[in-house]
Image (cartoon, helix red, strand yellow):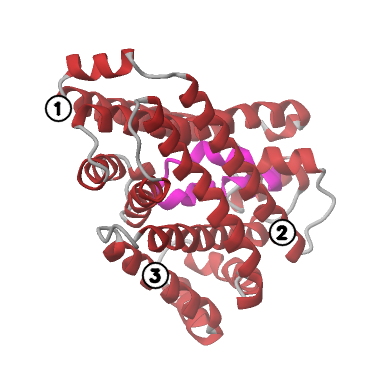
């Protein structure tokens, strides 16, 4: 038993991950609270309170439903990738709970912490993490493509996000070129092996992970995940439109999509936890500049949509993880 546990720790699947995860989430939530309080104070608390008193709260719960729809569509993408990698034998419920459990680390830069899903699969079904971790990279790639598509769709009337769409396109194209070229990828892995520390030990695992990632990102296998990503992220864009409707602010759906998608992309490209302190001012500023929303309403809508998407996801993730622990005691 001790040997098994030591092997799990060597593979990076340390039992201490869960407590560390909880602490990190709490720290970031405290930072987020400070950020939102700062926005509220800057916007004039009294005016913001007045806006919130007139807010139609049913629209917030509608936004939660739209966010959950985003999770369902992205789960279909997760299942698609598992099938490509020929990972079978996982019941649909456990697969869904595993996928959603990754949301506990949605607040990591670029959401790369969602590789936690690989840890969960390793602990519950003994599937090596290096086989499934590339799914997270493939997910982020197709998510970026989906968000960029939404920005471009909205750019017919608004041009403020085209620069970020271009930056995102460069990042996606660069990653795809590296992944498509085995020579470049193997060279990068060799560089990692030369680095002091655990580099040499990580080399073989990175090579195996590369094979999985290469299989997931072939051009023919990008189509379905990208379509699912566009649909999934549009639901969260629409959530912003619904929340603004709750403030009696009528904006175009494409306008709300452009604002949300641009702010999301900026937060993803700049490496800060959950895009905190980056996504919020961009979203608020775009609502004021492009949708002519007053500062207090823009602040209220921004805070509500972030709770309905980012923080709701974290809560759903912890709920899924709790259920998984009951179904699989060895996950603790």
Q: Which residue has dot 3 on it?
A: 169
Q: Is residue 253 above or below residue 242?
A: below
Residue at the right extreme, as displayed: 89
Q: Which mark is residue 42?
A: 1
Q: What secondary structure is marked by label 1?
A: helix
Q: Is residue 114 above or below residue 224?
A: above
Q: Is 212 a magenta residue?
A: no
Going 69% across and 35% down the picture, which residue do you hit? 331
Going 62% across and 61% down the picture, which residue do you hit? 225
Residue at the bottom extreme, as displayed: 183
Q: CA distance from mark 3 to mark 2?
A: 24 Å
**Among numbered discs 3 and 1, the one appearing first in the sequence:** 1
Q: Position of residue 118 (x, y in %)?
A: 63, 50
Q: Is residue 173 above or below residue 111?
A: below
What is the magenta range? Answer: 100-123
Going 65% across and 71% down the picture, which residue do you hit? 221
Q: Position of residue 287 (x, y in %)?
A: 27, 42
Q: Which residue has dot 2 on it?
A: 80
Residue 39 can be seen, yes or no: yes
**Among numbered discs 2 and 1, the one appearing first in the sequence:** 1
Q: Nearer the viewer, mark 2 or mark 1?
A: 1
Asked if disc 3 and disc 2 are in contact, CB closer than 8 Å, the reply is no
């Amino acid at each position: 038993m001790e040997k098994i546990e030591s092997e799990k720790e060597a593979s990076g699947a340390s039992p201490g991950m869960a407590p560390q995860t909880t602490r990190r989430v709490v720290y970031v939530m405290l930072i987020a609270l400070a950020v939102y309080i700062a926005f509220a104070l800057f916007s004039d608390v009294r005016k913001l309170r007045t806006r919130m008193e007139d807010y139609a709260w049913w629209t917030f719960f509608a936004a939660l439903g739209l966010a959950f729809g985003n999770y369902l569509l992205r789960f279909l993408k997760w299942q698609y990738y598992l099938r490509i990698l020929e990972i079978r034998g996982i019941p649909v419920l456990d697969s869904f709970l595993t996928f959603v459990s990754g949301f506990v680390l949605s607040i990591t830069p670029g959401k790369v912490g969602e590789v936690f899903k690989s840890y969960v699969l390793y602990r519950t079904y003994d599937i090596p993490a290096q086989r499934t971790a590339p799914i997270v990279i493939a997910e982020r790639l197709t998510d970026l493509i989906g968000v960029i598509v939404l920005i471009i769709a909205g750019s017919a009337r608004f041009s403020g996000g085209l620069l970020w769409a271009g930056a995102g396109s460069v990042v996606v194209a660069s990653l795809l070129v590296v992944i498509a070229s085995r020579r470049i990828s193997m060279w990068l892995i060799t560089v990692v092996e030369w680095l002091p520390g655990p580099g040499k030990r990580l080399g073989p695992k990175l090579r195996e992970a590369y094979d999985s990632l290469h299989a997931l990102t072939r051009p023919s296998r990008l189509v379905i995940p990208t379509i699912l990503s566009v649909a999934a992220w549009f639901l969260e864009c629409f959530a912003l439109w619904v929340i603004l409707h709750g403030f009696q602010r009528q904006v175009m759906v494409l306008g709300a999509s452009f604002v949300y998608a641009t702010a999301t992309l900026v937060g993803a490209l700049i490496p800060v936890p959950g895009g905190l302190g980056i996504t919020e001012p961009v979203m608020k500023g775009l609502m004021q500049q492009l949708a002519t929303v007053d500062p207090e309403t823009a602040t209220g809508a921004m805070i509500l949509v972030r709770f309905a998407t980012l923080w709701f996801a974290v809560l759903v993730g912890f709920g899924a993880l709790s259920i998984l622990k009951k179904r699989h005691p060895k996950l603790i």
